[in-house]
Amino acid sequence: MQKVIVTGGAGFIGSNLVDELIKQEVEVIVLDNLSSGKKENINPRAVFYECDVSKMSMDTFTYLFKDVDTVFHLAATPQVQYSIENPTDNNNLHSLINMLEVSRLIGAKRFVFSSSSAVYGNPKYTPIDENHPINPLSPYALHKSIGEQYCKLYSDVYDLDTVCLRYFNVYGNRMPKEGAYKSVISVFKEQYNKQPLNIVNDGEQKRDFIHVNDIIQANILVANFTKNHKGDIFNVGTGQAYTVNEIADMFGGNKKYGEKRIEPKNSIADTAKIDLDLDFKPKNKLKTWINTFTEEN
């Protein structure tokens, strides 16, 4: 990689990816409309365009970015509940299609799409491998699933090498308080000094938590892979799960039960494929991160 585009580069995962790419002396262009991302998250060494990639013209795109070799597409409205309440909002899908077409027109070598484990819906078995049936339970998840199909089509029909990463529960630096990337980790982090920790359902639901730095590692691994991905899909998780009650115990303090919510009982990644194909091994431990946080607060 020499020159890349990162859409959503002011957001949680995107800004962390930009920081790492710049550390590796990669030239980075950030595209973000700042609807959920923050300008202060953007590395000052990146070139920043404030724009909505779902509406930007093809002529403008191709003129500005003709020498880009890799595109990381993270831009999205990451709000499941918003998508349920606004099912006709197709901006996430329009953004993806626009960026795929731009990537084709400028001759990019690779397109990396940030998808989600939400495409699986209520899992029929765990751990969940990439062959698990798709069953989106929200327009947000449906658009991610359709986006994966678009990526495969662009690989098959237009010879644009694409790869899709299905993230599990991401936590770490700059994690949001709202949206699809809001997890019980960010909720407990906000509630830690206020107490009690509010637990949904019985707290026995299991989740696979992965640190944002490991997500960045996966993105860079797939971008640098020497063989063509051809629309391939990888789970990005740790393969280890904790119950919400266990997470609360790591933070310490009082627990409060009450809110009921319909959600998958267990969500655990089978990471055998990404380990075998890319030698991906998460380095960060959730318990260590929580211990560091509680010691500092």
Image: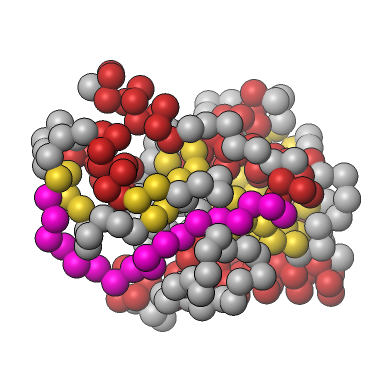
Q: Is residue 130 above or below residue 223?
A: below
The residue lying at 42 percent from left, 53 percent from top is 207
> In x, y percent, where is residue 240?
51, 47
**In this image, 46 relative to 176: left or right?**
right
| 72 and 260: which is toward the camera | 260
The residue lying at 81 percent from left, 57 percent from top is 229
| 147 and 170: which is toward the camera | 170
Magenta part of the chain: 256-273
In the rendered image, the residue lying farthest to the top is 296
- Determine the image quadrant of residue 171: top left
Quarter placement of the C terminus? top left
| 11 and 54: which is toward the camera | 11
The residue lying at 75 percent from left, 41 percent from top is 279
> In x, y percent, where is residue 282?
60, 37
Is any atom of residue 36 visible in this view? no
Q: Is residue 292 above or below residue 211?
A: above
Number of on-image labels? 0
**In this image, 235 relative to 160: left or right?**
left
- The kind of secondary structure the magenta stretch mainly shows is loop
Quarter placement of the N terminus? top right
- Determine the image quadrant of residue 266: bottom left
> In x, y percent, where is residue 287?
40, 32
> In x, y percent, where is residue 257?
14, 55
Is any atom of residue 247 visible in this view? yes
